[in-house]
Amino acid sequence: METILVLAASPVDTEPLRLGAEIAAVEAAIRSSRFAGALRVRSLTAPNRESVRRALLEHRPVLVHFAGHGTPEGLVFETEDGHPEVVAGDVLRDLFGHFTPSLRCVVLNACYSEVQARAISRTVDFVVGMPPTLDDPAALAYVRAFYDAIGAGEGVAEAVQLYRLDRRWAGTPERAALLEREGADPAPLVRSEVGSKGEETRGPRRLRGGSRLGLWFGMLGCFAALLAWLWPPGAGAPPGGPPPSPELYALRVQILSPDGEPVADGAVRASVGNEPHRLPDGWWQVEVAEAKVPLDRRITVWAMHESWTTGEGTFVLDGDPNPTLQVRLRTPRERILGTVTDADGRGVPDARVSVRSHSGPAVTTDADGRFEIAVEAAKDQRVRLHVEHADFPPKDTYCYSGTGACYVNLVR
């Protein structure tokens, strides 16, 4: 079994990214793919120098996916205490090159990563980089299209091309740049192969079916034929066995607020199945054909709403053709960056800033009067702050979460 290793870096003091959604998108695409049994996804959050080295040594991945921030100087990993550490492209080139030829592809889903991809492509067959600007929707769109193709047995170049076609269909410009090392093996990371006797074997490129394995499959086939003779179609399941799986599952999904109350609007997305549609009673329904159910029979559902952060729920499909699942949205968290100044525009240190209209901790301004405060509010929401200082009268002011800077002027 081949491994896809996802490195998800979101250090402190950097813009938050939806890395959990990106990891889930990779997992969902592979889990529902044709070669779900030949590929596995392993993720490493807060990757630093030691944890990345150990993960590469342990998993020997065929593909490494980096999700996070990038700069013209390098990719932003983390230190042991969670602070940003920029790693240059030549360092990554030598690191990933140490793990070839088993490592055949590196995907850099980060801003400015095309610069680093050019360095890494000297030692790795295929490297995918991105342009200077890349937002969360574009990053997730790339992940879904690319890994749908990889899981279906397409080559890396073909997977990138399918992503580009997906972006053309959506009416947005494609963003991925594929760099291919000279002499790179164009074969897919997983593929169907024809054995010496003409039989098709599926799985990682380096696996071969031996005679002993063929004997076991032959015995299994004989046993299946015997069962088919004893229990012809329409006779039902063998006595004492599990009930037959339905041909179609109709999963009903209800969206809940962070407080557990049903939500009247919103949207639902599922890792497998048809396009979710809303029912008259406010629930959503996802229909999944038995032929499309993943090997682990898990379906992941995401609930979305403009006022809250996306919620996620997982359900294991069994013999019930009409299961139900409730997905709770999460309370959003945004940051407010601001500065407290006096009448002359100088920063006021040691001012206490607290949140009045939403939930959030109180903070104290630094030596330059700057502050950063986290609030439980959606982006662009109006938040009332209260500012206190021993040398000034207290003041209430309004700022908007997640956008720009907030300035508070104190007057004696």
Image (tube, rainbow, N blue to C red):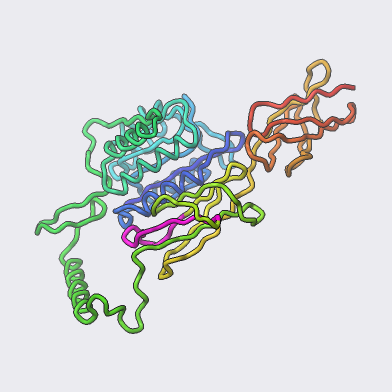
Q: Quadrant of residue 354?
A: top right
Task: Name the image quarter holding the N terminus.
Answer: bottom left
- Relative placement, left or right, of 301 versus 30 is right
Q: Residue at x 21, y 33 (%)?
A: 183
Q: Which residues are magenta?
A: 282-300
Confirm whether the magenta stretch covers residue 296.
yes
Q: Residue furthest bottom?
A: 239
Q: Is 223 situated left or right of 339 in this image?
A: left
* Closer-to-camera residue (166/160): 166
Please tell me which residue is depicted at 71% across the width and 27% down the height of the picture.
406
Point out residue 138 in the picture as x, y percentages from the top left corner. 45, 35
Viewer-nearest residue: 357 or 265: 265
Q: Residue furthest left?
A: 197
Answer with the quarter of the image where residue 130 lies: top left
Estimate the x, y position of residue 148 in percent, counting from the top left: 34, 46
Residue sticking out furthest to the top: 344
Position of residue 316 relative to residue 358, above or below, is below
Q: Is residue 90 visible?
A: no
**Would you say 298 lies left or right of 331 here?**
left
For the image, the number of numbered tags is 0
Q: Residue at x 17, y 57 (%)?
A: 200
Whole-percent x, y for residue 54 in the image: 44, 48
Q: Residue at x 46, y 56 (%)?
A: 285
Q: Quadrant of the C terminus?
A: top right
131 left or right of 409 in image: left
Rendering quarter of residue 254: bottom right
Q: Is residue 209 visible?
A: yes
Whether 337 is among the magenta residues is no
The x and y percentages for residue 176 are: 37, 31
Give the camera-side residue of 68 and 77: 68
